Structure formats: structure tokens, C-alpha cells
Image (cartoon, helix red, strand yellow):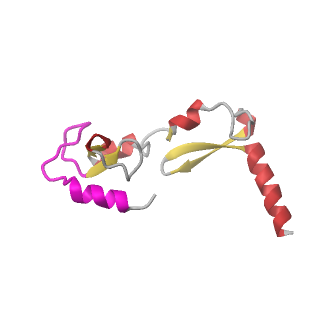
Amino acid sequence: MGTAGHSWAQRHYPLEGVACVDCGVAARERHHVDGNSFNNAPENVAFLCTSCHRKRDGRVGGLPQVWEQDRARAHCARGHEYTPANTYWFLQRGYALRRCRACNSQKQREYRARKA
């Protein structure tokens, strides 16, 4: 996502005198609750201190958070089951995301065939 939504939130939601909604210290950041920085509805923008913002985004302590939609799925988009042997995890923006090894292998074969 671009920065246009963040810029809009910075202009329209000043932080002066605002307390963190989680811990009560002075807020220093704006958090888009649904993860969409272009959704600047008042109910979607939470004022947080840096520490609480990192915790909400899963960037602090322990294992990173897993996107809810990733956790809920039992199969990839092509129908392969997410088993420990067929799943690999990687980090993106502080979240643990999973990918299907079978699909990844197929994509690599297709790429190599195009390059040959």
C-alpha cells in the first residue's frame, strides 16, 4: 500500500494531547485497525504509543502474529492441503505468512522453463 492514506490520517487526526487507547501514555502513532491505510473512518483509526502499536502489529516479543485469513484456511488457492510438510512460513510486515510448497515448486518449474 502507498502512503497516501497515512498522510491523510496524519493531517486529519492530530496527536497533540491524545492518549494511547491501550495503555494511556501519550499517543505517538495512528493505527489502522483493519490494516487498510486508505480506510480513514474515525472508528478505524486508533491512537497508540509506539510500543502498543508494535504489539498490535505483532512486531514485538514471541512469534509474529498470523493473518487471520491465513490461519483460517486449510488449503491453498489451488486446493493443496496446508500440512507441516507442504507449508513454509515467511515474515512480511511483521506477520508470519504461509505458502504452499507444492505451488511454489510448480511456479519455480514454470519460471525455469520460460528462462530456458
The residue at 26%/58% (across/down) is 10
View extreme (bottom): residue: 116
Compared to residue 83, the image places residue 37 above or below, namely: below
Give the x, y percent position of residue 65.
Answer: 49, 39
| Residue at 83 percent of width and 56 percent of height | 109
Above or below, comparing residue 75 to residue 15 in the picture: above
Pinpoint residue 92: horizontal percent, then vertical percent.
Answer: 53, 51
Quadrant position of residue 55: top left
Residue 47, how many percent across, how many down?
25, 45
Observer-nearest of 33 and 21: 33
Viewer-proximal residue, 69 or 53?
A: 69
* Residue 111, quarter of the rendered image: bottom right
Taking the magenta stretch, the answer to whether it contains residue 17 is: yes
Residue stretch in magenta: 4-28
Q: Quadrant of the C terminus?
A: bottom right
Position of residue 10 in the picture relative to residue 33 (left or right): left
Residue 34 in the image: state x and y as whole percent.
40, 42
